[in-house]
Image (cartoon, rainbow, N blue to C red):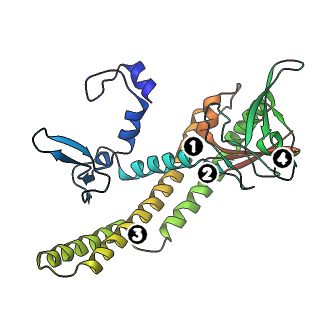
Amino acid sequence: IAESLKADGALTGGKKTNWHSSGIALILKNEKYMGDALLQKTYTVDFLTKKRVKNNGIMPQYYVENDHPAIIPKSVFMQVQNLIRWRHNGITTKNGKRRRINSKYCFSQRVYCGKCGDIFQRNMWYNPVKVAVWRCASRIKRNKKGRRCMIRNIKEPLLKTATLDAINQLIESHELADKQIKANIMKIIRNSKGPTIEELDKRLEEAQMKLIQAANQHQNCNDLTQQVMELREQKEKVQEIESENQVKLHKIDQVSDFVDEHQHGLQEFDQQLVRRLIEKITIFQRYMEFTFKDGEVIKVMM
């Protein structure tokens, strides 16, 4: 993102064009962009020099929701936080291996082993000619018992050809599957149990008013404080679920838009489409299974 902003000549808050990834990270994590405010992130240590330092728990902090008009929806902000956590934590595969996130290639974090569940990694082979090959990580490195996964290796040209085939099959069979998948998601949303965000907001507002009144009257506020904290946690969980549902619907729309644009199919492989359309590619001994972002699954024989 920083490199893109530099190339566009966009100005930072300090009217400079030299963007840094650390600055972008601060922007992405700043709750002010979704209309909330965390008060007392810093505090003054010297009132003469006005020097302020980061508050690492020395002073109390206060979180205010809907403090000001939002620039971006809260659902988008929550999606970004989930993505940041996912990239930081890495991937834990079905066989229990933890793999770091690497998005260097279009197939990175997209190709998985159908036998052991581990992730596929890109290697270069030079004999007899130079070619990129995708291999199960558990085949590259032995496990504690000295065993290796023996799933087949996939040369990148074959993987690209199969991907192009799968995308063209998606275009041909998409319309009916798209309607069914979207209907299933909407059914889940409508049948979801528990309070809505609006109901939780109302409860939270009432609990906060009681807490303020109790504090003004110097009463014990422990129970009310606990109630407010529990309501906030409950609201965060509901927001996360709503955010996930919005992401699912967005993915369906994204695939539908692509199909509408390319109704006559594709002639050449486009690496941008891998990230845009495909959630996962699973490699089996005789075929590949493509799971698209809208939930459709297509098999391609090898």
Tags 3 and 2 touching, CB below 8 Å: no
What residue is pinned by disc 3? 234
Mark 2 closeness class: few <14, some 14–19, many ≥20 residues within 10 Å: some
Which quadrant holds residue 61? bottom left
Give the secondary structure at mark 1: helix
Residue 295 picture location, percent across and down = 64, 52
Is 118 or 62 nearer to us in this picture? 62
Q: Residue furthest left?
A: 48
Residue 3 vertical placement versus 117 (above, below): above
What residue is pinned by disc 1? 256
Q: Residue at x 25, y 44 (%)?
A: 53
What residue is pinned by disc 2? 178
Q: Amino acid at mark 2?
A: Asp
Mark 3 closeness class: few <14, some 14–19, many ≥20 residues within 10 Å: some
Residue 284's disc number:
4
Is 299 or 288 nearer to us in this picture? 288
Tags 1 and 2 touching, CB below 8 Å: yes
Q: Amino acid at mark 1?
A: Ser
